[in-house]
Image (tube, rainbow, N blue to C red):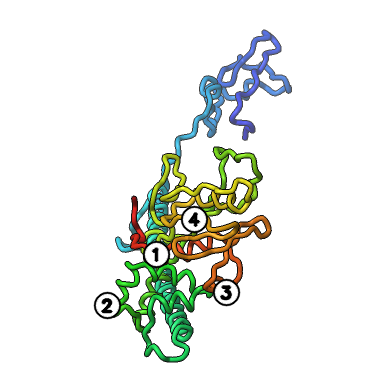
Amino acid sequence: GVRGASHAPPAVMSPAAGSAVTPGGSLPPGHQGVCGANISQIPSAITMPRSSTTSVPVRSRASSYEPPSPKPSAFSYQDDHGPNHSVSQASHANNGGTSATELEKALSAKTVELDAIMEDKEQQIKELQGKLKAAHAAKIVMSLVDSAGTTHGRITKTMLQTHLIGTPFEDFMQWILSNKQFSSHDRDHSGTLEKVELLHAFEEFYRHPLQTLVQRTVDSRYTPRGRNVGSANVSGITTMTGHGLTTIGRRSVESDGAYKPAKMYKAVDKGDEIDLRLEDFYNMTNSAIPFKRVNRGFYKFGETTVELKIVNNKLMAQTEDGWNRGKFGPIEKFITCFETLEREKAGIPIDAAT
């Protein structure tokens, strides 16, 4: 057989004429080939087998090959539509994203629900703690006021003032002594509070605790009048906002937001440091009860006589009735306590705004 059938055989040269004879041609009889074979014995026509390999045209080989764009493959899985239901990969990815979004929404809704439950539980705990605290406080106050058991479980304003000054319940005393609060808890209008009424008063007090007014100091607009007032204690007064007592009331307020009392105090003795300190402090409050100088270091605050002096560069007060356990206390604490009492004596409403 002939090897290399896929290639054309080389041309056969005639030694006589030097002409090339291609396969399939013929030579005159008697001619010999290159190898000495008798050409006449070669068939006049040689049939070459057709190549099984199809050649690629030159132009086609030179052009670039571009594979066809892939199409989304499909796979089968068994679901609600049957075992041969086909879904494309893209559709499966979209379904996965939708499922993740729905899961996130469900988790978010559950988190909000749990937060609401926790807030409700915390509120219930706070209310229970407030009731327990109120019950404990009412029991202690009743034992302090009626230690001898002579009041038959009923206490008056005077008893509260006498026994609660200088105790941890002094803030409650200032709050309950206002006419509005005392009357609202004195259900039978007897002028006294029973233990149950005292308990309810403490519950309301702890739901709306006293707040401290922002500590007031001399700002940059204040100009000292030739004396050292930089370290003077000019802090504000403890008040209750929103409900009940406003110890220093809601009286005159200047256009720049600073408080001023109903009647300004003017120092009588310019050489008395206590008198000057009192002027600086008192004129930054909105008290309705005026100070009146009696003697050096002694003043009248309404009907109450008070002694003032400077201790550790702070203005301190002491009264004759044993307020603050008979010791000097801050001037702010003194006004906080006696403002309410003196207003009631003078018939000035606690929440008057004049």
Callout 1 amino acid: Lys
> Percent x, y for residue 235?
55, 54
Callout 2 amino acid: His
Q: Residues within 10 Å of mark 1 (few under 14, many from 20)?
A: few
Whether tag 2 and tag 1 are in contact, CB under 8 A, the answer is no
Q: Which mark is residue 87?
A: none
Nearer-N-terminus badge (2/1): 1
Q: State the residue at coordinates (68%, 58%).
A: 312
Nearer-N-terminus badge (1/3): 1
Q: Which mark is residue 292?
A: 4
Q: State the residue at coordinates (43%, 75%).
A: 130
Q: Helix, strand or loop at disc 2?
A: loop
Q: Which residue is mark 3?
A: 325
CA separation in Å, label 4 and label 2: 36 Å
Nearer-N-terminus badge (2/3): 2
Q: Is residue 38 above or below residue 209?
A: above
Q: Residues within 10 Å of mark 3 (few under 14, many from 20)?
A: few
Callout 4 amino acid: Lys
Q: Which residue is mark 2?
A: 189
Q: Is residue 247 above or below residue 353?
A: below
Q: Which residue is mark 1?
A: 110
Q: State the residue at coordinates (49%, 49%).
A: 265
- Quadrant in which residue 220 is drawn: top right
Q: Helix, strand or loop at disc 3?
A: helix
CA separation in Å, label 3 and label 4: 24 Å
- Quadrant in which residue 255 is drawn: top left
Nearer-N-terminus badge (3/4): 4
